[in-house]
Amino acid sequence: MEPRYIFNDDFMADPSAHVFEGKLYIYPSHDIDAHSSENDNGDHFMMRDYHALRLDDVEHGQAVDCGKVLDLDDIPWASKQLWDNDVIDKNGRYYMVFSAKDKCGIFRLGVAVAERPEGPFIPEADPIRGSYSIDPCLFKDNDGEVYCVFGGIWGGQLQCYRNNELIENPVLPKGTEHCICPRIAKMSDDMLQFAETPREIEMLDANGNRMLAEDICHFFEASWMYRDGDTYILMYSTGDTHRICYAVGDNPYGPFRYKGTWLEPVAGWTTHGSVCFWGGKRYLFHHDSVPSGGVTWLRSLKVKEI
Ligand code: FUB
């Protein structure tokens, strides 16, 4: 199958793809043109709502828009920038964890709950206690435990935290300094809070050494975790080197060792994806900015087989 666009009706990005109730759903960010200037802080990503999409024919069809499932105006604690989200099913309900800035301009993770995959998702009054940064991925292990893997640097603010505390005067690592790594926390049974203090996932290069800031495959944002047999796969974006890479480990907490690159740089600054199995094949859902003529904040959804 040739890589192809799956939703030509609107600009959407950061697709989280899952099979729920025998159907393939995608939960993307909904890009808009807010006419804000582009900067390293990501101020040009001013998204205000989320939609759920359903894709019935992965290799040929266009996704169906199931409608708006959550609006910024309905989230009591959030002020702006609905960035990446993910959804998981548990105990017959659907839980979305999403990133947004609070009233102080700090990224937090929030939970919203739905009775059906198509939503609507009803947001909790407050963000997850102790949450920070962006790009939550919800990974359900074979024993039913759900983990939230999250974090992104630069505009995603992950460099502002050490040991889960805000630090003063954060600096980004450079050169041969260790790169900043994603965080992981098991979710509570009711899926509304972290059940434990988030831990940093150790990321290793192909030789088993700690990943460095200068490595082309360094972690930046957009974690996606899944399991294949006894192997845990952590896919992520390298941000400023514009790749989607993956690393493997033997448990969700890591360490994870770099294994390969699934997507070379695309049109537009960001790259971000999810992996979903459908019809016996493994697909990478992601985005690029070709249809908008390269506008970084107006991205379109794609799929390719991996
Ligand atoms: O969509 C806004 C941000 O761009 C996401 O949170 C990042 O992963 C990048 O795709």
Image (spheres, grey):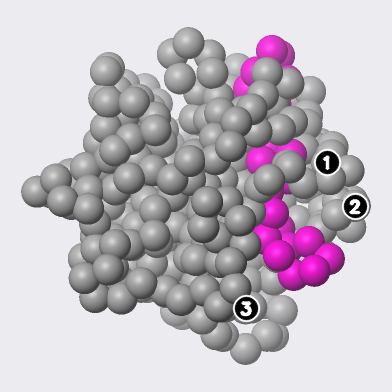
Please provide the residue range marked out in magenta: 88-111
Amino acid at dot 2 = Pro
- Residue 111 location (% of width, % of height): 74, 39
| Residue furthest bottom in the image | 37
Left or right relative to 12: residue 102: right
Q: Residues within 10 Å of mark 1 (few under 14, many from 20)?
A: many
Mark 2 and mark 1 lie on one chain; the one further toward the N terminus is 2
In the image, the residue with mark 2 has its CB under 8 Å from the nearest atom of ligand 1: no
Give the secondary structure at mark 1.
Answer: strand
Q: Mark 3 or 1 closer to N-term?
A: 3
Q: Are marks 2 and 3 in contact (CB under 8 Å)?
A: no
- Residue annotated with mark 2: 76
Q: Residue at x 60, y 17 (%)?
A: 21
Percent across and percent down for residue 233 are 31, 34
Split into 4 quadrants, where in the image is the C terminus?
top left
Q: Which mark is residue 123?
A: 1
